[in-house]
Image: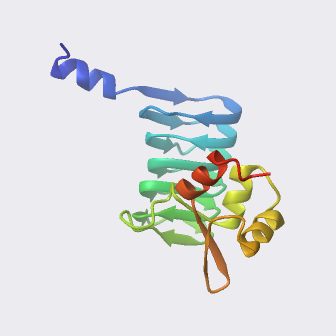
């Protein structure tokens, strides 16, 4: 039987990175991740992510709750909330249902506020997102979508794809 203390200890998994790393980091279980060094690549976390003041991150980041105080060059998708605190410097596009930018923090890019109920960040994909996800060229995404081979919706000139429908499409063996 797990006691309240055991549950609390289990949810407090902390990983503090104060080194130089390169590659793809994916956390499928919730963790409290703090990066204080340099990181380059792709970062996909569950739980909380803290980018410290001394950190330099060149990566696309997907996470739940993210706080940035250091330098980030890359696109950020926060599923719950994103806070930029001084002296943060972020260059890239942001998607989050809740965004806070404190005085002294610098943000250079575009932001898209997500509706938690209708536009989950882990489900909505742009043609560029989909091309990376399927590991194909973006022009092939447009070609397949225009011809009806790929499930997607067109809103004006912009294509949108739902990850769940794409996963079903792939599972049916229609990607060839």
Q: Which one is nearer the viewer's eye here, 131 or 10?
A: 131
Res. 52 visible in picture? yes
Q: Position of residue 87 (x, y in %)?
A: 53, 56
Place residue 19 in its image quadrant: top right
Which residue does the image show at 24% across and 18% down from the upper left? Answer: 6
Picture layout, residue 20 above or below residue 115? above
Q: Residue placed farthest to the top in the image? A: 1
Place residue 29 in its image quadrant: top left
Picture layout, residue 19 above or below residue 104? above
Q: Residue placed farthest to the bottom in the image? A: 156
Picture layout, residue 76 above or below residue 59? below
What kind of colouring is applied to the model shown?
Answer: rainbow
Which residue does the image show at 71% across and 63% down from the upper left? Answer: 128
- 124 left or right, relative to 129: left
Q: Which one is nearer the viewer's eye here, 144 or 74?
A: 144
- 55 left or right, relative to 4: right
Picture layout, residue 111 above or below residue 167? below
Q: Position of residue 61 (x, y in %)?
A: 59, 49
Quarter of the image with the N terminus is top left
Which residue does the image show at 51% across and 50% down from the upper left? Answer: 69
- 30 left or right, relative to 51: left
């Amino acid at each position: 039987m797990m006691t309240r203390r055991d549950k609390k200890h289990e949810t407090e998994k902390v990983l503090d990175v104060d080194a130089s790393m390169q590659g793809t980091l994916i956390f499928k279980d919730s963790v409290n991740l703090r990066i204080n060094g340099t990181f380059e690549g792709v970062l996909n976390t569950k739980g909380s992510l803290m980018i410290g003041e001394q950190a330099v991150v060149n990566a696309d980041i997907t996470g739940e709750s993210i706080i940035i105080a250091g330098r980030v060059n890359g696109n950020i998708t926060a599923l719950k909330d994103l806070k930029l605190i001084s002296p943060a410097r972020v260059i890239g596009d942001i998607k989050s249902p809740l965004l806070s930018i404190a005085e002294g923090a610098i943000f250079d890019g575009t932001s898209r506020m997500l509706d938690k109920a209708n536009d989950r960040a882990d489900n909505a994909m742009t043609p560029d997102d989909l091309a990376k996800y399927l590991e194909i060229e973006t022009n092939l995404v447009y070609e397949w979508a225009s011809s009806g081979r790929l499930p997607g919706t067109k809103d004006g000139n912009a294509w949108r794809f739902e990850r769940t429908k794409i996963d079903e499409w792939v599972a049916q063996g229609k990607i060839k």
